[in-house]
Amino acid sequence: MGRRLLAAVHLTHPETFEPVVLLPGDEPEEAVAALITHPDAWESGPERDAEGASPEPEDPDAPASGDPTPEPEPEPEPEPEPERKPAASRRRKAAEPGA
C-alpha cells in the first residue's frame, strides 16, 4: 500500500507527459509520488509529526535558533546640513557721505 494524499495535486506525468490531477485519498504510483515533494500533500511521512499535522512553518522575522537576542536596529542617519549660500565675492563699497 502506497502513501495517501491529504491534498489535491496537479502535475505532469513523468512518462506520458499528460496533465494529472490527484485528489485527497489517492495513492499515486511510485513514479508519480516521487514528484510530490511538499510534505503537506501527504497524510503521513517523515516530515509530519505524530498527530498527522505538519510542523509549524518558521517565522521569517523570528531570530535564528541559537540566537536569543535580535540584532539591534541600525543608527538613524544624521540629517543633512541646510544649504548655505555662498558669500558674495565682491561687494561695492558704500559711498561715503560728502564725498
Image (tube, rainbow, N blue to C red):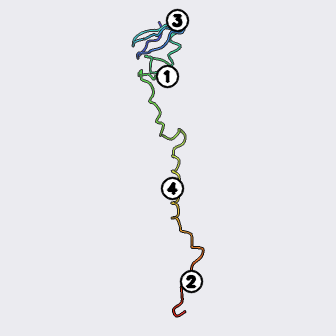
The picture places residue 1, in percent across and down from the top left corner, at: 47, 6
Query: Residue pushed farthest left?
Result: 24
Q: In whole angstroms, how far apart are the C-alphas of marks 4 and 1? A: 43 Å
**Dot 1 lies on which element?**
loop
Q: Which is in the foreground here, disc 4 or disc 1?
A: 4
Quarter placement of the C terminus: bottom right
Residue labelled with disc 2: 93
Kind of residue at disc 2: Lys
Q: Earlier in the sequence, mark 1 or mark 2?
A: 1
**Dot 3 lies on which element?**
loop
Kind of residue at disc 4: Pro
Q: Estimate how packed mark 3 is, as few (under 14), some (14 to 19) or many (20 or more) residues with alpha carbons within 10 Å.
A: few
Q: In whole angstroms, how far apart are the C-alphas of marks 2 and 3? A: 96 Å
Kind of residue at disc 3: Thr
Residue labelled with disc 4: 76
Q: Quadrant of residue 67?
A: top right
Left or right: 66 as drawn, with respect to 22? right
Viewer-side residue, 68 vs 12: 12
Q: In whole angstroms, how far apart are the C-alphas of marks 4 and 2? A: 47 Å
Residue labelled with disc 1: 47
Q: In whole angstroms, how far apart are the C-alphas of marks 3 and 4? A: 59 Å
Kind of residue at disc 1: Glu
